[in-house]
Amino acid sequence: MNDPICSCRSRLGRRRFLSGTVNSLSAIALTSLAAEEQAVAESPRIDPARPYAPRQPHFEAKAKNVIVVFCSGAISQVDTFDYKPKLIQLDGKPLPGNEKLVSFQGPNGNLTQPLWKFRPRGRSGKMVSDLLPHIGSMADDLCFIHSMKSTSNTHGPAENLMNTGFAFDGFPSMGAWVNFALGSENADLPAFVAIEDPRGNPQSGPNNWAAGFLPAAFQGTPFSTTKPIRYLDRPKDVSDTADRQTLSAVRFLDEQLRDRFPGDEQLAARIAGYELAARMQLSVPEAVDVNSEPPSLQKLYGADSPNELKAAFARNCMLARRLIERGVRFVQLFNGAYASGGRLNWDGHSDLKRQYDVHGEILDQPVAGLLIDLKQRGLLEETLVVFATEFGRMPMFQMGTYGRDHNPEGFTCWLAGAGVKPGISYGATDEYGFRASEKIVTPADFHATILHLLGLDHERLTVYHNGIQRRLTNVEGHVIQDILA
Amino acid sequence: MKFSGNTGRPRIDGYVLFESLKADSIQVSAVKVMRDVRHTILIALAFAVMPSRAQADRVDFVRDVRPIFQENCYSCHGPEKQKSGLRLDIKAEAFRGGDGWGPSLIAGSASESPLIELVTSEDESSRMPPEGEPLTEEEVRVLTRWIDEGAVWPEGVDLAKPDDKSDHWSFKPLGVVSGDLSIDKLIESKLAEVGLDRNPPTDPRTFVRRVYLGLTGLPPEPSDVADFVRQPDVNTLVDELLASPRYGERWAQHWLDVIRWAETVGFETNAERRDAWHYRDWVISSLNDDKPYDRFIFEQIAGDTVEEDAALGFLVAGPANLPGQIGRDEAAMRSARQDELDEVIRTVSQAFLGLTIGCARCHDHKFDPILQRDYYSMQAIFAGLEYGTRRLRGSLNDSWTSQMPAARDRVNSLRAELESLRRKHQLREPLADVHTESFESVVAASIRMRIDATTNGAAASLYEFEVWSNGKGTPENVALAAQGAIASASSFALANQSRHFDNLIDGSVDRRQAYPWVAAKPGPAWIQITFDQPATIDRATFQRGSSMPADFVIEVMPVGSSQWREVIHTRDRLPRIDDTRGVDAVRLTSLSDEETKRILRLTADLRRASGELARLSAGPQVYAASFRQDPVATFRLRRGDAMQRGEEVPPAVPEFLGDLRLDFDATDTERRLAFARWLTREDHPLTARVMVNRVWQHHFGVGLVRTPSDFGNMGTPPSHLELLDWLAARFVADGWSLKKLHRLILTSETYRQSSAPRAEALTVDADSRFLWRFPPRRLEAEAIRDSILSVSGKLNHKGGGRGFDFFNQRGGLSDYKPKETFDADGWRRMIYAHKVRMVSVGVFGAFDCPDAGQMKPVRTRSITPVQSLGLFNSPFVNRQAAFFAARLRAEAGDDLGDQIAFAFELAHARRPRPEEQARLVTLATDHGLEQVCRAIFNTAEFAIIK
């Protein structure tokens, strides 16, 4: 059901509080204030001067940090990870029981077999197609979820759903929630970084890393190896000395004010904000400098590729590792840009084979390189890698095109690393790869599981907004116990 | 004492909880726990002998059934938690059932009761209880029998009572506050309760800056400060500022935040909503005119009835998907309509009522007495609403209307001229969008159309190509795939949807569902249709696609022939007026070049004249709600699912708030008028309270109710209920005048006191909620940017009109490039920036600018390094710092000390302290005055209101 925007929290906790502490007149007044605080009792306590300070999870975490590889445009499950012999067998025949299916773009044609050959990979023998051989070679480290199911068949809302828990605009993204809950291990870098694809923004744009109604401090900071943080550098016509002197004057003036307003947290926070900004001016360029990585590693990721887009995405993958290594909590790595008829992202409606051959090459080796690199450094033990997309694609071609239409009924995501069972496949679609049929996983389940791995109870991580204690998982979500290591 | 938790379901907990839940006692004494434990043991013993008795006579709820619920269900469906909205410890709740399931108990029919289905399900993932062992066979038998016997649940046996959700302060009439009261007295009495007192009045300079920033969002000029210091007359100052147009520009932004107004649609396409800005101007001028608040509401709900069309931008302030972004299946279309109306309900109910009625879309509201039915009844009030543009009546419209006769004459005379030329040259009528050509009957095997050019130069495109046979008496289309016809074409385009030539003969002509054939590229193209068997044909009909064929021939292949025979061509037709081909491209048989040119000149003139007439006749437009007079029926939707209709509901307001209920067949206008009148009743418990609280919030940083758009049970109670009610009553008595309300607040001692912190007061009330001081706070993004411009001398006071741009584009999917430098247009106040939903503007977006995705009645005020980087390094700020420095040099003489003193007057409304001045003189001497100005823009003091 397309649940609109609603979530609800036990009311007794609140009631209990209201009725339990009243014993004098002055206490009534205080209670009314304290009761307001109660509404945010489950929310993390943020020190305004150090919004990114590390905070304790609800329970012991398996994962310290997260990298999400997000394939914008909806990558086809049946052409990548969801192997269906029956689909090959029935190639060119109508989908039994759904011969006249009308989906997002209109009528569908006949079943169409995967456009790349599937082969067994790794010791597990997991079938992965030749579109993504490098990722396939890592199959023993991956935990596939084949039974993902979304409630929207439109890119924007569905990307919102996968990255913010709601199909609507304006909700905090998963990274913002995690940043809000846990802060960061590195005081000199943003806690949550969104790395754009070199081809452009994903379909739902900044929604994917928005703070929604959380404080702006927790939104993702977008930058990549090709696109630096805005305003990081001093103005060109200002010398380094002048810049430092000016900054020092600002500090002097602010401290004067602070002395006249002792105990004001906001002033302390502001002074701290300028200090952090100054440190970021040094630490960000250092972190972004992927060229300092040895040639062997450049090669591993494919950063030496003559394909410039692949090399750029590979550098973004290296950046993701460097950020995680430096204690950044949450990194989103986008693969695929905005709507472009499938030209710049995975939205393969018209000519899927030709377009995916382009996208697959960009995605495959860099992501596999990232996994290998993380593993070699032991970082995979504390890092959760999430591979996701907004929905899947039809096992049929659309009528009159060489591509597949949107299919929210079944798609594949995978997890790897900290706290996750490696080399397994969870859930399944039916024999055509059409609908999730076994152990269905909703975006809320997916989010609940990711939060769980970070030591967070998705039902407890809440914040009050417009009448409701909001959660990433709305009123749903179950941790997928079977995939936890 | 922790009751049930995440640690499974300790059986004893369920019982203890049950006994004590009503207790105000969070503290359950150890003795009581022991007693409860014993009690539970007794019950457990009683349980052991029960089954045989249950079989013997009728199942008894208290004796037989409730213990099963207690043991198995109450930890999730009892007093503490009501998962899925289901509560099994209260009769009415249990029968009502949970969210979306309908009644969980069908008396007399266990087989139809979801409860039995859920406890007996073989699917572990859906079986209840979700953890631990399933119910024993015996327990299931007891429940089944009980339901089959009629599910008798005696009255009065429940140990808990349902909460009365309507017993809530904000749903009750305004309290009658008697006596000689004032803001200050009401604040003082609360302060006294906690042993605090008010700060002394602040100094005049701080005060004047506070009022300026608060009311206008701009700092005072040094002369304004000097005037007030000389004659500190608060009333005059407040009146002057309320009379300034700057006031409306500041306060309109607060309102736009509440309703998440923006000038793009949101979601994936985020396309521009052109002409939406009229609404912004309407809000600004309404505030400046001190339009009474009841009138302000009325016009936003029913402005069409009083020629206030721009006001209706309110109803469609929220995001909505474009039709093209909605799937083509029925479910997707219906649910998109529901989403559209949902945004309207949220806007109206949160903005005016401070209620989250939107929460009742799928189920009854969890916390407030709003039923799901109420939600749909409210939807019925707006059932006629459409998103889009409407005519903006007013002086511009009148002027356009007056120009119409002349424009119409021009069109008519051009038409007449063209028609006489057509007759003179014996040209046939222009092609129609759905065009039929007749020709001499022929027995043919195939037909083809060769398209040489289209009217707009785009690739050739047709929806359907029909060929009519008269062979069997009645005309029959033989160009159908269903008839065995086969299509082919020179090419077809690859796109997100089918552009295949099979679409030509699929028999589908409904534009909402059909797909066209589109050639892969512009230029000559052909299509061909071969019939199943030769047919006698005499007519062909084609439907244009995204382009219109302008120059084509139709040919047939007669039976027995291997040569195409031309039956139709277009060179004897008058060109269409949308034909934009150049003169050289058009060839008309039997006309000279000069004659052809003359005709094309005339068609071009007619095209422009018709366009002008259409523009004038549509009138100026505003993006605002429009309405259909006979709204479609509104149904309650089970679980909010657009495909699961329940009963039809009438237009009505939530039952607990009033008895306004209209007939099912009330017209759209009747619905909205009645609703607007109900909203603005003087005795409405919410309308005035909600608004005075918003005003208070923007003067003190926090409302008396901290959740300004939620006055329900989940909102926070007011810190000063009496004060809120007193203000609300005054507001209504003062004719809903916002300016009078401002005056009342701003002239109070409470507002005028100093913001200086006091250690002992901070320990009692760190947030200053009791208002023992004026709470200092950071300014909003708009006020910071506007202040920078004001101080640098570059602020452009041009008000109203189309907004300036922060980006290279005004809407669209992605790839917004922020503008880094602005000219005078971009130096207008920030409220006049074209507002793109979901995309954060450069530098100032980081200061918690709402993204207009969800409503933001309270802005967060975060402090981040990204803000610092933007303010310190951005071209915008540094350029303004240079202008600021130039202004200082021009206006403060040559002395550095004087320049810096003047800078402080401008930026901080005070003179610098000696140590500040000395420090900045050094900086200016070493690195230039620009760096001083850059530093000042970056000080905390510049960005706070204190």
Image (cartoon, helix red, strand yellow):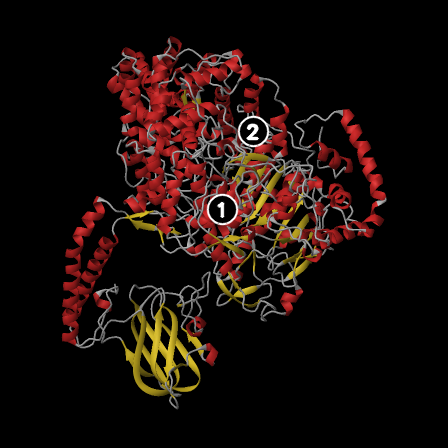
Q: Which mark is residue A41?
A: none
Image vertical order of residue A6 relative to residue A87, above or below: above
Q: Is residue B361 left or right of residue B52?
A: left
Q: Is B484 rendered above or below residue B795?
A: below
Q: Outermost residue, bottom direction?
A: B560
Residue A166: quadrant of the picture: top right
Query: As rendered, which of B648 and B225 lies closer to the eye?
Result: B648
Is residue A31 visible in the rendered image? The answer is yes
Q: Label 1 lies in what chain?
A: B
Residue B899 in picture, x, y percent from top left? 30, 15
Check whether the beta carbons of the residues at disc 2 and disc 1 lie within 8 A of each other.
no
Q: Residue at x 51, y 56 (%)?
A: A347
Q: Nearer the viewer, mark 2 or mark 1?
A: 1
Q: How many marks?
A: 2
Depth check, front residue: B251 or B94: B94
Check chain identity for marks 2 and 1: say if they share one. Answer: no
Q: Amino acid at mark 2?
A: Tyr
The image position of residue B5, as x and y in percent, is 71, 35
Q: Chain of mark 2?
A: A
Estimate the x, y position of residue B545 in percent, counting from the top left: 36, 66
- Label 2 sits on a secondary structure element that is loop
Other-residue count near label 1 (Cα within 10 Å), few / some / many at <14 / 14–19 / ≥20: many
Which image quarter is the C terminus of chain A in? Answer: top right
Q: Secondary structure at mark 1?
A: helix
Residue located beneath label 1 in the image: B375
Q: Where does the image place residue B203, in percent across and percent down from the top left?
A: 37, 12
- Disc 1 marks a residue whose amino acid type is Tyr
Residue A52 badge: 2
Residue at 63 percent across and 55 percent down: it is A133
